Image (cartoon, rainbow, N blue to C red):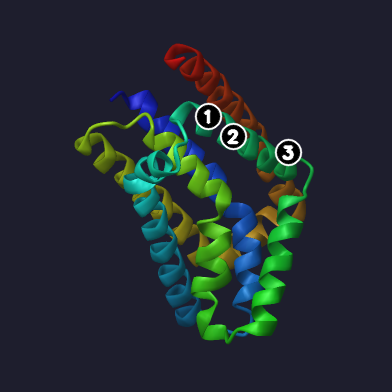
Amino acid sequence: MSADLLINAFITIIVMYDPPGLAAIFLGLTQGMTRSQRIQVALRGTVTGAGILAVFAIAGASILGILGISIGAFRIAGGILLFWIAFEMIFEKRQERHEKSAEVAITKDHISNVAVFPLAIPLIAGPGAISAVILLAGSFYAPVERSALIGVIIAASIVLFLTLVIAERLDQFLGSTGRTILTRLLGVVLAALSVQFVVDGIKQVFITT
């Protein structure tokens, strides 16, 4: 297990979280709340989201095995899915989709449940993040390495939590233009990572066949 692998995992998870974009949505979800209430929502949401991702980091490969799906095939499929998410980030489609999810939640659920839905699911632990974690888990074989991956998930979640805590100040600092630029840059990084997942998956499929 190399430092490069840990850094790659951390960057992948952070990009999937998209803290700048999620901060703006978080402000909309918690509109009318006090600062302490927002902190409670942010803490509950990030802890729940991180817990879900940790479960998939540990058991994701076993689930794939039960379904008869090879890691190589999942790398290819997951890489394509992550590339689509990167495409949405670059062309400002993902933010629009997340905002629609948030609007549905506000109209159907009480404000106290916002931390679980849609903040934890699907905004933090969505299909893209879950796929990314299962893909990353394929490179962390030993129990100690899996523990390191969970540590990376926790570290990335702490960064996200701190971002949500200062969401109001961050939103004012970045502004609409700054958020757009940063999200697009993260989208380009994710696109490159997703292509690498596909390449690794193709190599793995050919090696095992």
In the rendered image, residue 63, in percent from the top left (x then y), is placed at: 39, 46
Residue type at numbered disc 1: Ala
**Gap in angstroms between the C-alphas marked 3 and 2:** 15 Å
Examine the rendering and report whether any part of residue 181 can be seen: no
* Disc 2 and disc 1 in contact, CB within 8 angstroms: yes
Question: Residue 151 in the image: x percent, y percent?
Answer: 30, 46
Q: In the figure, 182 relative to 34: above or below?
A: above
The residue that appears at 67% across and 32% down in the rendered structure is 188
Vertical placement of residue 10 versus 23, above or below: above
Whole-number angstrom distance, CA of label 2 to CA of label 1: 6 Å
**On the image, numbered disc 1 is attached to which residue?**
73
Left or right: 81, with 12 as reference point: right
Frontmost of labels 3 and 2 is 2
Q: Which mark is residue 179?
A: none
Q: Are marks 3 and 2 in contact (CB under 8 Å)?
A: no
Q: Secondary structure at mark 2?
A: helix
Image side of residue 80 versus residue 160, left or right:
right
Q: Which is more N-terminal, label 2 or label 3?
A: 2
Q: Quadrant of the N terminus?
A: top left
Q: Amino acid at mark 3?
A: Phe
For the point 73% across and 58% down, which residue is it? 97
Q: Residues within 10 Å of mark 1 (few under 14, many from 20)?
A: some
The residue at which mark 3 appears reads as: 87
Residue holding disc 2: 77
Q: Residue at x 48, y 43 (%)?
A: 13
Are there few (<14), some (14-19), or many (20+) residues within 10 Å of tag 3? some
